[in-house]
Image (tube, rainbow, N blue to C red):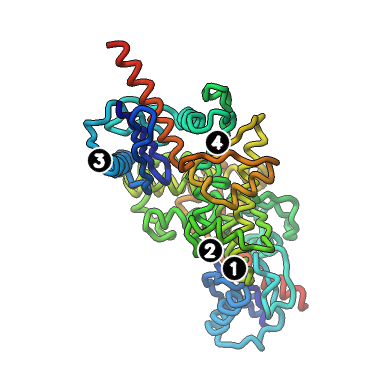
Amino acid sequence: MIVAGCDVGSLTAEAVIMEDNRILAYEIIRVRPRPEQSASDVMNKTLEKAGLRIDDIEYCVSTGYGRGRIPFAQKNVSEISCHGKGAHWLVPSIRTVVDVGGQDCKVICLDDQGRVKNFVMNEKCAAGTGRFLEMMAKTLGLTIEELGPVSLKSENPVSITSQCSVFTEFETMVLINEGKKIEDIAAGINQAMARRVYALINRIEIKKDLGITGGVAKNVAVVKNLEELIGFKAVEFPQDPQIMGALGAALFAKENYLKQQRRK
Amino acid sequence: MIFAGCDVGTLTTKAVLLKNDQILAYSIVTTEAKAEQSARNAMNQALSNAGITIDNVKYCVGCGWGAARIPFANATESDIRCGAVGVLWLLPTARTVIDVGGLFTRVAQIDKEGRVIDYVMNDKCASGTGRFLEIMAEALEINPDDFDSPSLQGSHPVNITSQCSVFAESEVITYVNEGSEIANIVSGINNSIALRTATLVGRLGVIEDVVIIGGVAKNQAMVKILEEKIGVEIKKVKFDPQIVQALGAALIAKQKAG
């Protein structure tokens, strides 16, 4: 049984192909102007990696903000459910998922079956999202991948006082011109980012274990700062944390496919 | 005797030279990385327009984000106070000043002496400011000045649902990709700026006459929508609205020197 999950987010799109209980292949791409385009591009790349064709996929579930516009998906499921599902499948002890995506940030509470009990979300302000980090990395002349590692060299992190991305961008430019070290500014930005995510976590009662998903989970400094704020370590996923939504979608695809077969 | 005002804003730096009671020259330059250099650039341009040198300036007052770092300023004054003094000189009946600048929007109620009675500003979010307008212009690949262009005012404005500049930019890009007409997107953005400004105005309330200054005040299409939203006429100052604060600084320089 071959199933797939496709997550079209605001900044990146991911696809996961599974055979029974095994991940066959996954891909992450930068989104294209249209969700349909992003979905077919990322799916074609993943299919190629797995050595399969679209006809080989028995069921596909889409998720993410473009989930209603994926032509090859039989069903779409909210990204909150998908992140919970994917994270719980990888780490069954997980009860809280902090998903920091390109344009939003969510804290999702799960029951012992990986079902969503409750969640909070920031979708009003780019502070505390991947877009915020991207903007500041650009201003610092760094890639998004460099922002975490560079900041680990800092001995004297600057204090970022603004919350708004536009204000922080200006503050960053001023700090550069004052001659502050790039690593110290980067460290201040990662701290500010962690503070924003923590403010959201504080709005909901959380339980251990906690895992961080989404692209920002790859920023070592943000994860470290966030762990310091919450007072314990986040679980490590045995897979790329950025594919959690697509993985959850693939798992929903599997469930739906089996249900369909039983009905026949 | 010549007096000067220099306003180092977050996006642009302005200088005004005053001779007795007349504006001798002024300049607007882009704010550069360093406040000191931006101030020099603006002042040198104004001086050269007037055909004089800095030695001719008797007293200079600085304001704006970089006020403390203007090398040739004799004193500094708050932005709101400078704005109030500049506005009253141009329109003595003004009692509410709306200033939409680069990163900050301020609304102030003033008395006839230019004293600030009360004010509100956006301190947490850059939505609806000059930088917001710039980001949208970049996303649309047009000039910020074009937001005022009559040919770019659409009859069916798109709805910009995000307040956040970053999210609104993504929305604009989506509208472009979906084939919305640029004019309808421009009008949607003007609506959005007017709404943000009107919300701030609403927090303070208005006393007439109401005046708008700052770079974004040049966007008359937006000002017209703002007028409708707040329900009172917004008077125009008979001068470039972007340099009114620097003008106020120059007028204060004259008072201080006198």
Q: Amino acid at mark 2?
A: Leu
Residue A51: assigned label: 3
Q: Earlier in the sequence, mark 1 or mark 4?
A: 4
Chain bearing tag 2 is A
Query: Crowding at label 2, few (<14), some or many (≥20) Cα neighbours within 10 Å?
Result: some
Q: Earlier in the sequence, mark 2 or mark 1?
A: 2
**Given contact means CB atoms under 8 Å apart, are the residues at marks 4 and 2 in contact?**
no
Disc 1 vs disc 3: which is toward the camera?
3
Q: Nearer the viewer, residue B115 or B5?
A: B5
Q: Position of residue B155 (x, y in %)?
A: 35, 42
Discs 1 and 4 lie in a common subunit: yes
Residue A176: assigned label: 1
How far is mark 4 from mark 2, CA to CA?
27 Å
Residue A140: assigned label: 2
Q: Residue at x 54, y 84 (%)?
A: B48
Decide: is A107 above or below A41: above
How far is mark 1 from mark 4, CA to CA?
31 Å
Q: Residue at x 42, y 40 (%)?
A: A9
Q: Residue at x 36, y 31 (%)?
A: A62
How far is mark 2 from mark 1, CA to CA?
8 Å
Q: Earlier in the sequence, mark 1 or mark 3?
A: 3
Query: Crowding at label 1, few (<14), some or many (≥20) Cα neighbours within 10 Å?
Result: some
> Label 4 belongs to which residue?
A106
Disc 3 vs disc 2: which is toward the camera?
3
Left or right position of B44 against A72 = right
Q: Earlier in the sequence, mark 4 or mark 2?
A: 4
Chain bearing tag 4 is A
